[in-house]
């Protein structure tokens, strides 16, 4: 796994997922190792962590802590791998045809 000692991501549109949810325009995130240390305004965190390696997000969306757990596992079979029997027409039939193989790795 790629790890950085620390990095400051600036100039991002940050969705905080807090209560209440907040969006920080020109927001920043500072992380160290595998931990999010602080989220806030780019100017504030830039002043606080002046020596940090930086990445300019150029206004892109940054959602700290969000993990996208969906997958496109069917695509592997659509590209030439086969399942036994007739081609499955639904996700449930596809999973049944795979047995437990799709979670084996």
Image (spheres, helix red, strand yellow):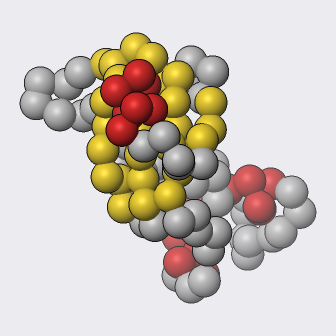
Which residue corresponds to the image point at 50% horizontal and 24% vertical from the top-left?
12
Which residue corresponds to the image point at 57% horizontal and 54% vertical from the top-left?
71
From the viewer's perspective, is residue 23 above or below residue 78? above
Res 99 quadrant in image: bottom right
| Residue 37 drawn at (x, y percent) | 31, 52
| Residue 86 drawn at (x, y percent) | 73, 63
From the viewer's perspective, is residue 31 above or below residue 97? above
Which quadrant is the N terminus positioned in?
bottom right
100 or 86: which is nearer to us? 100
97 or 79: which is nearer to us? 79
Which quadrant is the C terminus positioned in?
bottom right
Residue at far left of view: 19
Which residue corresponds to the image point at 24% horizontal and 34% vertical from the top-left?
17
Res 81 quadrant in image: bottom right
Q: Quick check: 105 left or right of 35?
A: right
Q: Quick check: 72 left or right of 51?
A: right
Which residue corresponds to the image point at 60% horizontal and 41% vertical from the top-left?
54
Q: Quick check: 31 left or right of 54?
A: left
| Residue 103 drawn at (x, y percent) | 53, 78
Residue at far right of view: 80
From the viewer's perspective, is residue 8 above or below residue 25? below
Residue at far top of view: 25
Q: How many marks?
A: 0
Res 19 quadrant in image: top left
68 or 95: which is nearer to us? 68
Is residue 4 visible in the rendered image? The answer is yes
């Amino acid at each position: 796994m790629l790890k950085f000692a620390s990095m400051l991501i600036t100039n991002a549109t940050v969705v905080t997922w807090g209560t209440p949810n907040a969006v920080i325009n020109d927001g920043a995130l500072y992380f160290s190792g595998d931990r999010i240390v602080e989220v806030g305004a780019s100017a504030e965190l830039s002043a606080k962590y002046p020596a940090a390696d930086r990445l300019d997000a150029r206004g892109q969306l940054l959602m700290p802590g969000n993990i996208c757990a969906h997958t496109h596992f069917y695509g592997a079979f659509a590209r030439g791998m086969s399942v036994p029997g007739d081609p499955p027409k639904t996700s449930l039939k596809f999973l049944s045809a795979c047995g437990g193989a799709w979670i084996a790795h």
